[in-house]
Image (spheres, rainbow, N blue to C red):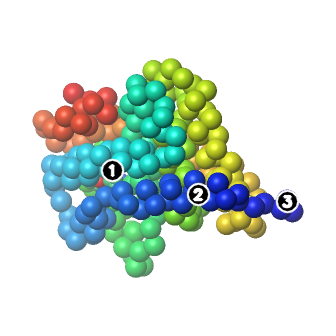
Amino acid sequence: REKVEITKEQRALMKAIVDAYNRHQIPQDVAKKLLQEQYSPEENFLLLTEMATSQVQVLVEFTKNIPGFVSLDREDQIALLKGSAVEAMFLRSAQVFSRKMPSGHTDVLEERIRKSGMPEEFMTPMFNFYKSIGELHMVQEEQAILTAITILTPDRPYVKDHQAVERLQESMLVVLRKLCVLQHPQELQYFARLLGRLTELRTLSHYHAEMLTSWRMNDHKFTPLLCEIWDVQ
Ligand SMILES: O=C(NC1CCCCC1)[C@H]([C@@H]1CCCCO1)n1c(-c2ccc(Cl)cc2)nc2cc(F)c(Cl)cc21
């Protein structure tokens, strides 16, 4: 077994990211709201757009705390945020869905989401992704670093200094790999499976615009920030 140890610098990098991740969480708990009662498609859509809008704001704050991010070219910073916001939203939704809940609550939550007004054809890929994230039982450090890795994806549209982003992402990948070996010693290839979820995440995110515009209701209203981030309106 390879002797894996996290260096002092890597521990500091991890701490910075996890602290930022925990500091910047969604204010209200959307899961609690959905468990409380059944909403109409219009109310669910409004809830989603409100949650997603505040999540984007939170994502910007989190991203600014990723060591090295603010030293990137300013336009590249915007390109990375715009390019990863939808994936970050689905990743966050998956993490919320996978949280340990009293027995039966997850089933109620799934039922509420299935009936929220979203078009049927996206349920299977979305819940397959949520469940594949849940099966990994990620610790919060892994969740935080995986989100940072998603944001620091060099091949987003309009990124100019590819190399600079790759260097930042590389240092996160190195830490994540060590963390996976230390946290899941019995699960070989855990790190590879974790990264494989990012491929599933990108595929799911391709559907987001259609998922939103075909929500079972008329006149879909988006906030200006969501129009910026999502390919809608
Ligand atoms: O609000 C949501 N997610 C926020 C987004 C910001 C970060 C925190 C979680 C939505 C809900 C779905 C029901 C109707 C109200 O919206 N949601 C989505 C979802 C997201 C995008 C699309 Cl296009 C479709 C569904 N998946 C969820 C999984 C969950 F466990 C929970 Cl609690 C809610 C979830």
- As displayed, is residue 173 above or below residue 183? above
Q: CA distance from mark 3 to mark 1?
A: 38 Å
Q: Residue type at mark 1?
A: Val
Secondary element at tag 1: helix
Task: Count residues near mark 1 (Cα–Cα under 10 Å), then give few for <14, some for 14-19, many for 20+.
Answer: some
Q: Earlier in the sequence, mark 2 or mark 1?
A: 2
Q: Residue at x 52, y 63 (%)?
A: 140
Image quadrant where one finds the N terminus:
bottom right
Task: Count residues near mark 3 (Cα–Cα under 10 Å), then give few for <14, some for 14-19, many for 20+.
Answer: few
Residue corresponding to mark 1: 58
Q: Where, by quadrant of the figure, is residue 28 drawn? A: bottom left
Q: Residue 207: image x %, image y %?
A: 40, 36
Report the number of discs: 3
Q: CA distance from mark 2 to mark 1?
A: 22 Å
Residue corresponding to mark 3: 2
Residue corresponding to mark 2: 12
- Nearest the viewer among 54 and 76 is 76
Find the residue positioned furthest to the right. Answer: 1
Foreground disc of the pair 3, 2: 2
Q: Would residue 137 be visible to someone looking at this image?
A: yes
Q: Residue at x 61, y 47 (%)?
A: 172
- Dots 2, 1 in contact, CB < 8 A: no
Drawn side of residue 78 relative to residue 44, left or right: right
Mark 1 residue's CB less than 8 Å from ligand 1: no
Q: Residue 40: image x %, image y %?
A: 16, 55
